[in-house]
Amino acid sequence: RVEVQAVVAAYAKVLAAADGTAGNAGAEGTPTAQDYLRLGVTGVDTPEKLALLGDVIDGKARADVDTVAELQALADAVAAVVTGARAPPPSLPPLAQLSLLGVTGVTADTVAAVGLALGRAPLADLETLAEIQAVATQAAQKVTAALNTIREHGTPGKEPPTVQHYEDAGVSGVTPEHLGAVNSAVAAMDPVSKDEPGEVQAAGNAYRAVLAAADGIAGN
């Protein structure tokens, strides 16, 4: 009976916090790590995960957290955000998990950069949804600005992209050695053919393959 009562009390905390209004957790506060364990929710094993999950639940409606499966999905998304990009090898949180937590403004083009930015952020800056949103917004803006610079390359009067622009856009493998060649390829592309990181990445990969082959030694 005591164990059942503890489960009831733990879920009461969840439902009291999840009133659809952020920043007003119930009188008993947000659930503790032990509360989640009593409910069968796993993975809430660091102070940062506990704080972030509590903050996310505080902004949810009761219908969003009225099953253990829903709580576990939120806990998994929190873990992906807090530790995913720090794991060896890194595992970036997918767009669906960021959306589930309530993070907005992230697209398929910016999600990788957002994940990497979350992985670089201090853990102390990942304890509330507002902090996660701030990191995501800044990263997404950098991607958009970098893609605009890359897209406009080839237009008279526009500065050529730097290695940093490609990195900010989520395009890998562009080094100072290859920058001039990659920029020449990008400048020749139609603007609509270079408005996504994947398209620019493909162009960069193709040009690096050409440069690797042209090593001055025939037959290799």
Image: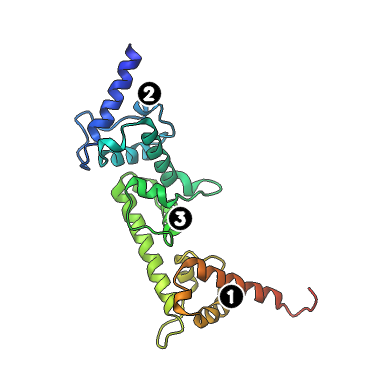
Residue 100 location (% of width, % of height): 36, 46
Q: Secondary structure at mark 2?
A: helix
Is residue 137 among the parts visible in the rendering? yes
- Three-letter amino acid code of the residue under disc 1: His
Circle nearer the N terminus (1, 2) = 2
Q: Residue sitting at 43 percent across and 62 percent down? A: 109
Circle nearer the N terminus (3, 1) = 3
- Three-letter amino acid code of the residue under disc 2: Arg
Q: Is residue 194 above or below residue 52?
A: below
Q: Nearer the viewer, residue 126 or 144?
A: 144
Q: Which residue matches tag 1?
A: 178
Q: Residue sitting at 31 percent across and 50 percent down? A: 131
Is residue 175 among the parts visible in the rendering? no
The CA distance from mark 1 to mark 2 is: 55 Å
Q: Is residue 107 above or below residue 220?
A: above
Residue 94 location (% of width, % of height): 45, 50
Residue lying furthest top in this view? 1
- Which label is found at residue 38? 2
Q: Are marks 3 and 2 in contact (CB under 8 Å)?
A: no
Q: Residue sitting at 61 percent across and 75 percent down? A: 207
Horizontal side of 176 relative to 18 (left or right) equals right
The image quarter in which residue 10 lies:
top left
Circle nearer the N terminus (3, 2) = 2
The CA distance from mark 3 to mark 1 is: 23 Å
Q: Is residue 7 above or below residue 175?
A: above
Residue 93 location (% of width, % of height): 45, 49
- Which label is found at residue 116? 3
